[in-house]
């Protein structure tokens, strides 16, 4: 980052802080006992090239301020995209009017002041990309061309996209807490269509990083897109039965996301979770460990504090298969008679340790018969009962080798049983996501095909 951009960042921080202080001071003047302000400003661009031609070009600049006020245990909030002093004061007035007419909720309020973050390490999250629009168009064109040139059976394309966004966010509250977070996110993606006789298939691939220089090359992303698409050609059906199932890294994180939903405070206090009252119980095999790492440099979910200013920490969620704690904000923690875990706004780099020295290839090699899942379709998951049923696309495996692609089938089970039946977690970790895990193998899932 050059000196000019540093000056720009410092100027933006001062501007955001001044606007937030106007809101806090006006909330106190209007009688609020507590208040919090979330304010942010960012910019970005996105270009899509399809069939070698520019299809879309987008520029965006966004800013917003959200204000929450408390009158005792009554609360109200309002938001605006106008940072002028008059607009901010009008928003504060609206929030205060709402709060005065809402019912008391004894669990309302800011997180406790002693829980506020005190240290703000450099997490290496902010790396604006100075790519020009012409440069982005060229990168997208190279990505799509690489995909189209890979195989003659690739007959059409949905295009390649290059996008970039960076911004600064600020959270302040009447405890005196002030916390800035800066971040950037850049990506290159591609999607193509392959055809053989009457069989048509599509697939995609992408990369996403905080630093543009860490992105995979557009040519390699295009190549991977083409390979993933062509390998789907000739997909048929599979016989209904019980099979071991491997979820490749691009879809395995969805299984852990269902754990997140089930142990979130809002699901628990509403008694809408299949893991209600399961803390301290064995819900995974003994070799499964799941934990947060909020201070990983450059990672997708890294943060020094959560959405309430509470210091993040390396929470141990599952240890030796045993559920150790829930994911709580201050409100949900009070509802449950517990203490916030620093998870207002979600998890921060949730990691699942590998259990084998290998990844997808080694898992496939271990199967006599089974299925590899590369795409999940639909949202048939019941968070209350844990019942799981989703359409899928994948590959049938016999004697350690992929035999053919398969489609139009459903995998079904119950998440409690599925978690218990995890037999392997690979070391092929997908680090692009906030949930960081490798391939996951589950023994004996019901597959409904023909």
Image: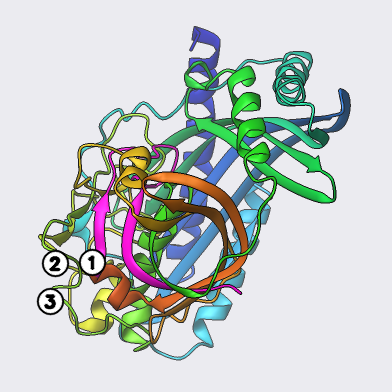
Residue drawn at (64%, 46%), measured in percent from left and top?
A: 232
Q: Residue at x 26, y 62 (%)?
A: 422
Residue 38: x, y in percent? 48, 53
Quadrant the C terminus occupies: bottom right
Residue at the farthest top position: 3
> Is residue 432 highlighted in magenta?
yes
Q: Could you tell which of marks 2 and 3 lies nearer the N-terminus?
A: 3
Which residues make up the magenta segment?
A: 421-450
- Decide: few, some or many residues near mark 3? Use Cα within 10 Å; few <14, some 14-19, many ≥20: few
Residue 446 x %, y %: 43, 75
Q: Which residue is label 1 attached to?
A: 340
Q: Is residue 374 above or below residue 70?
A: above
Residue 324: give its label. Answer: 2
Query: What's the coloring here?
Result: rainbow
Q: Does the stretch in magenta take in 284? A: no
- In the image, what residue occupies the spot 35% across and 65% down? 260
Q: Is residue 18 left or right of residue 377?
A: left
| First in residue order: circle 3 vs circle 1 | 3
Q: Determine whether 315 is above or below 261 in the image.
A: above
Crowding near pointer 2: few (<14 within 10 Å), some, many (20+)? some
Q: Is residue 340 above or below residue 249?
A: below
Q: Locate residue 160: give its quadrant.
A: top right
Q: Residue 163 in the image: state x and y as whole percent.
A: 66, 31
Q: Which mark is residue 281?
A: 3
């Amino acid at each position: 980052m050059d000196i000019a951009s540093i000056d720009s960042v410092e100027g933006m921080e001062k501007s955001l802080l001044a606007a937030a202080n106007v809101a806090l001071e006006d909330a106190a003047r209007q009688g609020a006992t507590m208040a919090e302000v979330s304010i942010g400003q960012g910019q970005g661009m996105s270009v899509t090239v399809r069939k070698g031609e520019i299809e879309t070009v987008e520029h965006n600049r966004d800013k917003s301020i959200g204000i929450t006020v408390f009158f005792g245990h009554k609360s109200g909030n309002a938001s605006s995209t106008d940072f002028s002093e008059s607009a901010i004061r009008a928003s504060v007035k609206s929030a205060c009017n709402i709060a005065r007419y809402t019912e008391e909720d004894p669990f309302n309020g800011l997180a406790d002041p002693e829980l506020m973050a005190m240290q703000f390490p450099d997490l290496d999250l902010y790396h604006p990309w100075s790519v020009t629009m012409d440069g982005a168009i060229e990168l997208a064109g190279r990505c799509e061309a690489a995909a189209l040139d890979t195989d003659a059976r690739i007959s059409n394309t949905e295009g390649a996209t290059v996008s970039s966004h960076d911004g600064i966010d600020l959270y302040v509250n009447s405890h005196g807490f002030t916390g800035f977070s800066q971040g950037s996110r850049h990506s290159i993606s591609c999607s193509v269509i392959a055809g053989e006789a009457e069989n048509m298939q599509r697939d995609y691939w992408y990369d996403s990083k905080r630093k543009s220089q860490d992105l995979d090359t557009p040519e390699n992303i295009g190549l991977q897109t083409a390979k993933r698409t062509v390998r789907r050609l000739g997909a048929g059906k599979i016989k209904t039965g019980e099979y071991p199932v491997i979820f490749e890294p691009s879809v395995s994180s969805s299984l852990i996301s269902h754990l997140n939903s089930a142990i979130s405070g809002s699901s628990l206090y509403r008694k809408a979770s299949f893991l209600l009252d399961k803390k301290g119980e064995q819900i995974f095999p003994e070799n499964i460990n799941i934990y947060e790492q909020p201070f990983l440099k450059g990672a997708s979910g890294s943060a020094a504090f959560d959405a309430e200013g509470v210091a993040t920490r390396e929470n141990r969620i599952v240890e030796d298969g045993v559920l150790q704690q829930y994911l709580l904000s201050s409100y949900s923690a009070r509802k449950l008679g517990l203490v916030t875990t620093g998870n207002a706004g979600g998890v921060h780099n949730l990691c699942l340790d590998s259990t084998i020295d290998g990844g997808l290839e080694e898992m496939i090699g271990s199967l006599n018969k089974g299925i590899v899942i590369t795409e999940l379709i639909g949202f048939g998951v019941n968070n209350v009962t844990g019942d799981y049923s989703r359409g899928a696309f994948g590959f049938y495996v016999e004697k350690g080798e992929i035999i053919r692609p398969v489609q139009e089938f459903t995998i079904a089970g119950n998440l409690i049983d599925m978690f218990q039946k995890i037999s392997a977690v690979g070391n092929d970790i997908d680090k692009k996501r906030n949930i960081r895990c490798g391939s996951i193998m589950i023994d004996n899932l019901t597959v409904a095909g023909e």
